Amino acid sequence: MSNNLLQVDKLNTKIFHGDYTVDAVCDLSLELKEKEILAIIGESGCGKTMSMLSIANLIPQNAKVVSGQIIFNSKKLNISDEKELQDIRGSQISYVFQDATASLNPIFTIGEQIKEMFIAHNCFSPNKAKESASKVLELVNLKPAQKYYNYYPHQLSGGMNQKAMIAIAVASKPKLLIADEPTNSLDRITEITILKLLKKLNAEFNLSIILITHNISLIENFADTIAIMYAGRIMEKGLSQEILHSPKHPYTKALLDCLPKKGKELNAIKGSVPNLAKLPSGCKFHPRCPYVMEKCLKDEPDFVKISQEHSVKCYLQ
């Protein structure tokens, strides 16, 4: 029997804009084991967030998951059943949004917002919920808890608000945490602090994590596996060390070449991420690819298996 906590097969999400439709997520397939940390990496606009919002059923009103299958914790989910997905979301799947300050309610204290999670999902009494909220504040290193419990979001730094969002997310002891750019706009030291916190929660609570990021330099010692996204598609996926040290897709190589290296000039990927409403034919990366061939212009390649855990969507393999 598979030990996958999450399995997504050929998930497709469309966004409807008046007289045209955007294929925001195309044939998304991925697996996530229990206790595993998966990093979804790509430039802004590549479909990372929309893919994860589709799994959590948090997509905008003008979007729809039109096909595909999601199996979570050995149960096939009905992607059109809002009630079923709502019951799972928050209790078994938690989502940490990119802008913590905007996601927190400004008129309630941090402690009260965590307390509400225990009341909503665990049916705790107010006193027990407050006690549990204080323990979670300690867990995410907002100490002393009695101090931070009474703080409002505007009284905290960006990093502290992100810790508060993580506290809310893990209050119900979910099996899966999706963290969308949790270190965005934070300084390097705070970035590392947040990733260490997520790693600690992963180890202590057997928490599976999907981390969305555009910063490939952050995840070498953090993620177990990596999926590279471009134009709403996964282009390469595999074990972290294989992807980082033996990349096969030109886009993955280009992302890694953008990292600063001692004694070398910074590189940039030529061109820009395509408009999802006007995608090129064939391989969606071909207008920016230095290795483009004639067949890349016409037909989109299938996945090629490089090793047991490593697959790539490219004709070069």
Image (tube, rainbow, N blue to C red):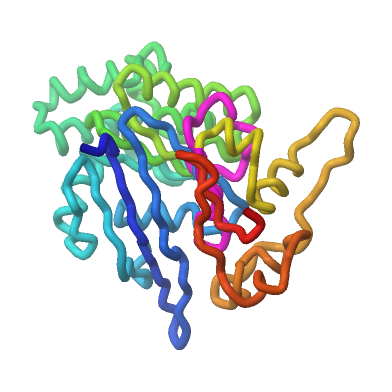
Corner quadrant of residue 284: bottom right
Residue 118: percent from left, percent from top: 18, 31
Residues shaded magenta? 211-238
Q: Which residue is drawn at 33% across and 52% down?
A: 8
> Percent x, y for residue 219?
57, 31
- Residue at the location (18% across, 59% down)? 78
Report which quarter residue 148 is drawn in: top left
Residue found at the very far top of the displayed protein: 144
Location of residue 286 in the rendering, given as x and y in whole percent from the top left corner:
68, 66
Image position of 104 with respect to 112: above or below: below
Q: Can residue 256 be seen in this view?
A: yes
Left or right placement of residue 214 versus residue 288 in this view: left
Does the magenta run of residues contain 148?
no
- The number of discs equals 0
Q: In which quarter of the image is residue 96?
A: top left
Q: Who is closer to the viewer here, 73 or 3? A: 3
Which residue is located at x 44 percent, y 23 percent?
Answer: 199
**Which quadrant of the figure contains the N terminus?**
top left
Say which residue appears at 39% left-offset and 34% top-offset.
Answer: 209
Residue 181 visible: no
The answer to whether residue 161 is above or below residue 77 is above
232 vs 69, left or right, is right
